[in-house]
Image (cartoon, grey):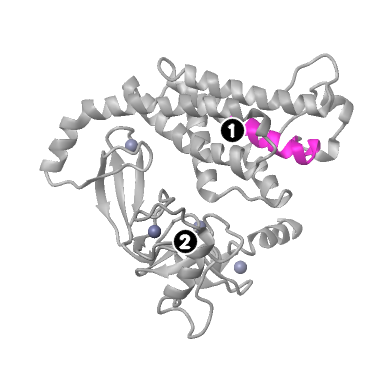
Amino acid sequence: MGRTFISQKKQTKEDMHDALVKNAIDFLDSSLDDLDKRPKNSVVDFYTSIELFLKARLMTEHWTLILSRPELANLDSFQVGDFHSIFLDDAVTRIKNILKQPIGANAIDAFKALGEHRNQIVHFAHTKYQDIQATKASVVAEQWSAWHYLHELLVSDWSPIFDNYLEEFERIHQRMMGQQEFIKARYTAILPQIEIKKKSGFEVENCAHCHMESAIITQKNEWSNDYECMVCGVKDVLIKKTNATIPCQSCGKEFQFFDKELKRCPNCGEEIDHEYVYEMCKERYSQGDEWCEEGGEWIAYCHKCYDDRPSVFYIDSLWSCISCFDRGWRAITCPHCNEFVTGDMDTIKYFACVRCEDKARAEFEESGF
Ligand SMILES: [Zn+2]
Ligand SMILES: [Zn+2]
Ligand SMILES: [Zn+2]
Ligand SMILES: [Zn+2]
């Protein structure tokens, strides 16, 4: 990316921020324009847009934060567009460490997946031939998932920073959702093949990416199922569902609350209050698994969404985060910092956990390795 702005006259920092955001919006539009004929260009532009938005967010904190080497910052050069800027990874790290507003792991995963796809396209000219409809479907699904998180950051987490652009975001959102028609048409075209799979004994579920009932279960695991989607081609994992219930805070009727999409009580329509769910879970799921100490910690910090307080309860035989709705990880007390956390056991054991990884990394860097 390197030199982002080419301009003759000096701009104010506000001008530059505005130019950055408008540039990011332009890339979203061109990404959508390219979907039909050049789905691969579409991926590249979409990714560029994400990077620009993250930089715009950093810039509102301080303009030097978007420079690859802030120690060489020079305002005069900056204002004529002569500087090297950072890439996604650094932007994510700075947002987490300097702004103290970590972007959730699921969002980062979605952005990185798009980034990997972009790199394949940019660096390898000859990729395997794929039917353009299938390519488009997978690109649409990938963009939906990245847009879902980006949209959330722009209109809610980072409000009011981007409030001047809400109308534009809404317009893009409508364009993005308009692709649903394409996905549905593709689903209808492929339905006979899905039926054949079903008849030969495969289970079919909803794909987490394109949301069609076209996810063919390829392998069943203890807490999840592997699948491959026939509409968008994505290979992913479906987390095991739970039927666990809590009573509604308003009508008292029990409902299945562990569902990311559920915003209201299915019985009375009252909006579900996260604080209430939290307190209810504390009451109902007041024990950990057999590895937990008697009377010790039983709510774990989540390494997927970095929620500031412990959010992972032992529900229906699996550790389940009520903030990001991920489940199935193991929870232990970190041997380095003593916090009760979820995560990959080896990483925690040999490196650090979600609560102490920043400190561990800083110490590692200081030690000169
Ligand atoms: Zn799919
Ligand atoms: Zn209710
Ligand atoms: Zn979580
Ligand atoms: Zn730790």
What element does badge 2 sit on?
strand
Residue 34 relative to residue 228: left or right = right
Q: Where is residue 196 in the image (x, y as percent from the top left)?
A: 13, 36
Q: Give whichever of 96, 25 is nearer the camera.
A: 25
- The residue pinned by badge 2 equals 321
For the N terminus, give its image quadrant: top right
**Magenta stretch holds residue 62:** yes
Looking at the image, is 323 positioned above or below residue 278? Answer: above
* Residue 267 is at least partly visible in this image: yes
Q: Does the residue labelled 2 lie within 8 Å of ligand 3?
A: yes
Please name the amino acid that badge 2 sits on. Answer: Cys
Residue under the point 70% across and 46% down: 94
Residue under the point 87% across and 31% down: 74
Q: Position of residue 96 (x, y in %)?
A: 67, 50
* Magenta stretch, residue numbers: 49-66
Q: Residues within 10 Å of mark 2 (few under 14, many from 20)?
A: many
- The residue pinned by badge 1 equals 50
Q: Quadrant of residue 348?
A: bottom right
